Image: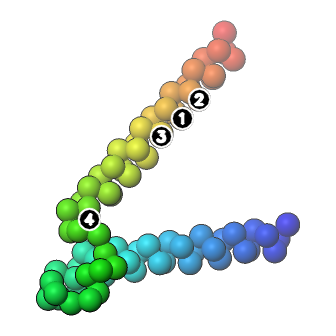
């Protein structure tokens, strides 16, 4: 099981680093590149650079609130 945990951890690290690198290049470096450059074919329009994190944050907060609410309801049922 230890090897599987290390493999999953490595894959999650690689995926997180890839997403971070892509987003950083997209938001910080790409605005300084000419719009007719071929690299623009690999990136979404700039509007999505703000829309995607906002929706992801709202979804994360919603799931967190649902989880905390369900835990509070379960703990209230156990105490009575």
* Badge number at residue 67: 1
Task: Say if mark 3 contacts mark 4, CB within 8 Å.
Answer: no
Residue at which label 3 appears: 64
Q: Is residue 75 left or right of residue 66?
A: right
Can see residue 24? no
**Quadrant that contains the C terminus:** top right
- Callout 2: helix, strand or loop? helix
**In the rendered image, which residue does mark 2 sit on?**
71
Q: CA distance from mark 4 to mark 2?
A: 34 Å
Q: Using a 10 Å C-alpha cutoff, classify the residue at mark 3 as few (fewer than 14 neighbours), some (14 to 19) or many (20 or more).
A: few
**Label whose residue precedes the other's in the sequence (4 or 1):** 4
Res. 65 visible in picture: yes
| Point 29% across, 69% down: residue | 44
Circle 3/circle 1 CB separation < 8 Å? yes
Q: Is 63 situated left or right of 77 in this image?
A: left
Mark 2 → mark 1, Cα distance in angstroms: 6 Å
Tell me whether circle 2 and circle 1 mark residues in contact (CB < 8 Å): yes
Can you say whether 47 is above or below 41 in the image?
A: above
Which of the two discs, 3 and 4, labels the residue nearer the N terminus? 4
Which residue sits at x=65%, y=15%? 77
The mark that comes first in sequence, 4 or 2, is 4
| Label 4 secondary element | helix
- Please, is residue 57 above or below residue 38 in the view? above
Residue at the spot x=45%, y=35% of the render? Answer: 65
Q: Tell me the residue that label 4 is attached to.
A: 49
- Considering only vertical position in the picture, is 78 above or below 6? above
């Amino acid at each position: 099981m230890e090897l599987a945990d290390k493999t999953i951890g490595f894959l999650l690290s690689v995926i997180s680093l890839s997403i971070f690198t892509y987003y950083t290049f997209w938001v910080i470096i790409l605005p300084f590149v000419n719009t007719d450059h071929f690299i623009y074919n690999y990136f979404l329009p700039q509007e999505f650079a703000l829309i995607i994190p906002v929706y992801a944050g709202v979804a994360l907060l919603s799931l967190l609130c649902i989880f905390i609410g369900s835990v509070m309801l379960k703990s209230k049922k156990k105490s009575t």
